Amino acid sequence: MLTYLKKIFVKPNSISFKKVNSIKQKTYFLNKLKYKLWSSTKVKIITNGDTSLGVLHENYIINELSFQSQNLIRKKINFNKVYQKRFFNFGFLKLRGKSLCLLQDISTKRNYAHFIFDLVSRLILIDRNRKISDYKNILVPSYKKKYEKNIFKFFKIKESQIIDCSNLKKIYCEEIDIPEHLFWKINFNWFENLE
């Protein structure tokens, strides 16, 4: 019974993407800024609270691909609520085909400036280096507001591609690309680093 519970109620360990063979990293440039794009297969994405996004391969949370912040400062993986707590290893929305993850934290779901600054910059990177039409699924924080729909329409993203993740907590992707956030570096403080 205990072995069964450990399989379904999982506490993830953290790991660097470099130790996972299925994760590949490419570097791109956008207006002289270096940008990383990670590609992988068989990835779980779990949100927990407003400021934690866990990207997992098997039951390992990937340090570089996960996101956590506190008081507007991006933090290291030990602040990630997915990493701190256990999760049930079932009930995932399963997405087949190639997916693009544009998720981060709640700010892109509720705030126009963050949506433009955080999400659109990554869409521009993808648009300049890949074909958006190649993605079967595009995971977005929300698809309810008029400006969100207009931006996605501008990038010629079809409604059938969009996965509104505003009410989703757990997603399993068969194949996924995750672009790095250009501006949220570890220990970056929005109010101290804006110069």
Image (tube, rainbow, N blue to C red):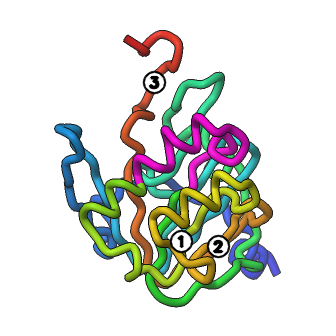
Disc 3 residue type (three-letter): Asn
Q: Which secondary structure lies at badge 1?
A: strand
Secondary structure at numbered mark 3:
loop
| Residue on which the image places disc 2 | 163
Q: Position of residue 26 (x, y in %)?
A: 21, 61
Q: Report the magenta residues as a range.
A: 103-122
Which three-letter amino acid code belongs to the residue tagged 1?
Answer: Ile
Q: Earlier in the sequence, mark 2 or mark 1?
A: 1
Under circle 2, the secondary element is strand
- Residue at left offset 20%, top offset 54%: 27
Q: Mark 2: give few (<14), some (14-19) or many (20+) Cα within 10 Å.
A: many
Label 3 – label 1 distance at C-alpha: 28 Å
Image marks 3 and 1: residues in contact by CB distance under 8 Å: no
Q: Position of residue 153 (x, y in %)?
A: 54, 66
Does the magenta-highlighted stretch encompass residue 119? Answer: yes
Separation of marks 3 and 2 at Cα, in angstroms: 30 Å
Residue 47 part of the magenta segment: no
Establish if 88 lies above or below 68: below
- Residue at the image point whose x is 48% and y is 76% from the top: 99
Looking at the image, residue 57 sits to the left or right of residue 110; the answer is: left
Rendered image quadrant of residue 112: top right
Which residue does the numbered mark 1 point to in the structure image? 138
Q: Identity of the amino acid at label 2?
A: Ile
Residue 187's disc number = 3
